[in-house]
Image (cartoon, grey):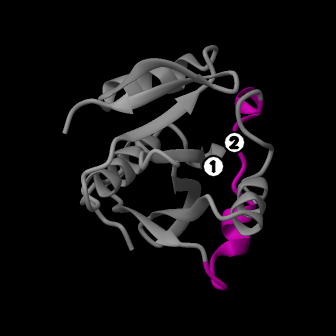
Amino acid sequence: MIDAGHHDKAGRPITLRSVDDDNWRAVADVAPRDDQRAWVPALAARYLLLTSRGDVWTSLAVYADETVVGHVMWGVDDDGSHWIGGMMIDAAAQGRGIGAATVSTLAGWLAARDGHPPVRLSYHPDNTAAAALYTALGFHPTGDMEDDEIVAELTTR
């Protein structure tokens, strides 16, 4: 379990946990709002398949107290940088600070790993909500693009 002491607006602790036999169905059923489907798949199940079929990404379940409310994944690039990807907070749980707590928790954990690697993520240029969230959390565009997404790196520690 990864616990950085963050809470949502209702005071529930936000933790990141391994996806396992007990929670994978709840994680797979996480679904974004309809207006977010231009940037994320219809269900987190796609991310779970991606992590189970490759060796780059690791999926984590996002919990608010003892309830699965989202999915996030992390991976290590060839240059040693650590990446956050595939974040999806269930539509019913959005607007409560869970996304910010998730990114803060995972970014801090990744940045503290051996060698203090750079922490990066990417987002579509039209996803202004993601851009605002990531900027507020200390991520800034590097000038690079990954596919059609802006690459941002954590610049505050």
Q: Position of residue 106 (x, y in %)?
A: 38, 53
Mark 2 residue type: Pro
Residue at horizontal 37 percent and vertical 23 percent from the top: 135
Residue at horizontal 58 percent and vertical 55 percent from the top: 70
> Tag 1, which secondary structure?
loop
Classify mark 1: residues with Cα within 10 Å, few (<14), some (14-19) or many (20+): many
Residue sitting farthest toward the front: 79
Q: Position of residue 99 (x, y in %)?
A: 46, 43
In front here: 81 or 59?
81
- Left or right: residue 41 versus residue 22 is right
- Left or right: residue 146 versus residue 11 is right
- Which of the two labelled residues, at mark 1 and mark 2, occupies the earlier sequence position? 2
Quadrant of the rendered image containing residue 125:
top right
Residue that carries the numbered disc 1 in the rendered image: 90
- Magenta-drawn stretch contains 33: yes
Residue that carries the numbered disc 2 in the rendered image: 32
Magenta stretch in the rendered image: 20-37
In front here: 153 or 126?
153
Residue at horizontal 34 percent and vertical 41 percent from the top: 118
Q: Position of residue 150 (x, y in %)?
A: 55, 21
Residue at horizontal 36 percent and vertical 67 percent from the top: 2
Quadrant of the rendered image containing residue 96:
top left
Q: Are marks 1 and 2 in contact (CB under 8 Å)?
A: yes
- Residue 142's tag is none
Q: Position of residue 120 (x, y in %)?
A: 44, 38
Mark 1 residue type: Asp
